[in-house]
């Protein structure tokens, strides 16, 4: 596999351009072209000879859209293929205020959460920063007609990004941070860090490191339980990091960035969503500068865990609100196209295509 040019920052593109004997202003043309979702060979402002020289070392396209599935509610699910043939998926959710794209950070995952399809075959490999970024660049380019923000090279249909596809972002820390810097850099696709949410299963030391990067993104922690024992039953990582330590890291994040943080709480029948759990969640989080997103479990056929009823989900939400927590129950969209993490890739691999 050749190198991925979308891994490079603007300064690195500048160095590359000069090193190859081109004028410095070519860096702007190259960086902008790439951030508009173009392949190297499609950037018309660059000479054929220069592009051929680049193509000796770099992949022309970091990523290819292998398939797109359209849900009746407008949601689009993507199956992406990388140069080495690996597959990941992504989701585009169309909200009135702009599009939100869910991107993957790893091929597979090694965290082993019991409800999640991404982890079924373990971790295959980390994605590079440019492979993460390119998921956004290609989808953005496919939706030119729906531009909601920015102008020129920064014109964007995709306004919000959530790192909630396959993979654990903080298990691929360096590439994810590089991605965050490149995606928010001036002159590129320039997504606002405030519109990026990074979701983690709670790798505590990396949460501290992320806070120290000073990127004002939305930090989201997958909690899914109110005590360590229950949490460890569904999330093996809970054996390494305790809820109390996660809360301390969140506090540090808030003190460093001034940003409130988020918790994801997936409602799993018979496991974590009775009245007693809702009350325990209130006791755990009351008074903290946080917001809770409740998710109804998207049942994965390889797993036995069951989703809860709508009635129980609203009752749970009601208890949180009465207890003074800021909380929402996520609307379920895209379920008809395998919207949950890793479901589509798992189906695809199973078909043996
Ligand atoms: N590794 C990161 C990102 C994963 S996906 C993390 O753990 O946060 C984003 C969210 O979807 C997480 O909260 C994850 O726990 C949740 N999730 C995964 N599979 C799910 C499923 N089948 N149904 C509902 N939520 C799921």
Image (cartoon, rainbow, N blue to C red):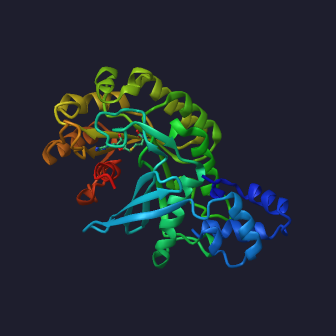
Q: In this view, does 50 lie above or below 267?
A: below
What's the residue at 41%, 27% (across, down)? Answer: 237
Residue 175 as seen in the image, left or right of residue 301: right
Where is residue 68 drawn, in percent x and y? 36, 66
Residue 23 as seen in the image, left or right of residue 348: right
Q: Quadrant of residue 123?
A: top left
Q: Specify whether residue 148 is in view.
A: no
Q: Is residue 251 above or below residue 148?
A: above
Q: In this view, does 233 lie above or below 296?
A: above
Where is residue 166 drawn, in percent x and y? 41, 46
Viewer-closest of 203 and 138:
138
What's the residue at 28%, 45% (across, down)? Answer: 295
Query: Which image quarter is the C terminus in?
Result: bottom left
Where is residue 50 drawn, in percent x and y? 76, 70
Viewer-closest of 44 and 181:
44
Residue 316 as seen in the image, left or right of residue 345: left
Where is residue 6 drawn, in percent x and y? 63, 58
Q: Specify whether residue 221 is in view.
A: yes
Viewer-closest of 334 and 50:
50
Q: Is residue 63 above or below residue 269?
A: below
- Ligand number 1: quarter of image: top left
Residue 215 as seen in the image, left or right of residue 164: right
């Amino acid at each position: 596999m050749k190198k991925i040019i979308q891994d490079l920052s603007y300064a690195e593109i500048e160095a590359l351009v000069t090193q190859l004997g081109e004028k410095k202003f070519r860096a702007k043309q190259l960086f902008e072209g790439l951030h508009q979702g173009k392949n190297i060979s499609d950037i018309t402002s660059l000479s054929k000879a220069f592009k051929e020289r680049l193509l000796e070392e770099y992949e022309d396209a970091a990523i290819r859209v292998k398939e797109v599935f359209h849900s009746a509610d407008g949601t689009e699910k993507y199956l992406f293929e990388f140069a080495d043939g690996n597959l990941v998926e992504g989701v585009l959710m169309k909200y009135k205020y702009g599009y939100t794209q869910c991107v993957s950070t790893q091929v597979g995952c090694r965290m082993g959460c019991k409800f999640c399809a991404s982890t079924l075959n373990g971790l295959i490999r980390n994605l590079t920063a440019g492979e993460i970024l390119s998921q956004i660049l290609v989808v953005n380019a496919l939706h030119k007609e729906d531009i909601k923000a920015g102008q020129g090279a920064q014109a964007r249909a995709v306004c919000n990004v959530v790192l909630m596809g396959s993979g654990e972002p903080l298990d691929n820390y360096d590439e994810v941070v590089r991605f965050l810097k490149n995606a928010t850099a001036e002159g590129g696709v320039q997504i606002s860090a405030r519109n990026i949410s990074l979701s983690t299963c709670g790798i505590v030391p990396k949460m501290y490191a992320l806070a120290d990067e000073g990127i004002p993104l939305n930090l989201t922690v997958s909690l899914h339980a109110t005590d360590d024992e229950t949490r460890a039953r569904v999330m093996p990582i809970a054996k390494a990091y305790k809820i109390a330590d996660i809360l301390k890291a969140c506090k540090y994040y808030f003190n460093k960035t001034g940003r409130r943080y988020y918790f994801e709480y997936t409602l799993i029948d018979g496991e974590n969503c009775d009245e007693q759990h809702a009350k325990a969640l209130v006791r755990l989080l009351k008074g903290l500068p946080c917001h809770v997103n409740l998710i109804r479990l998207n049942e994965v056929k390889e797993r036995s865990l069951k989703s809860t009823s709508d009635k129980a989900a609203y009752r749970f939400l009601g208890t949180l609100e009465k207890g003074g927590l800021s909380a929402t129950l996520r609307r379920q969209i895209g379920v008809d196209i395998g919207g949950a993490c890793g479901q589509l890739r798992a189906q695809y691999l199973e078909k043996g295509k």
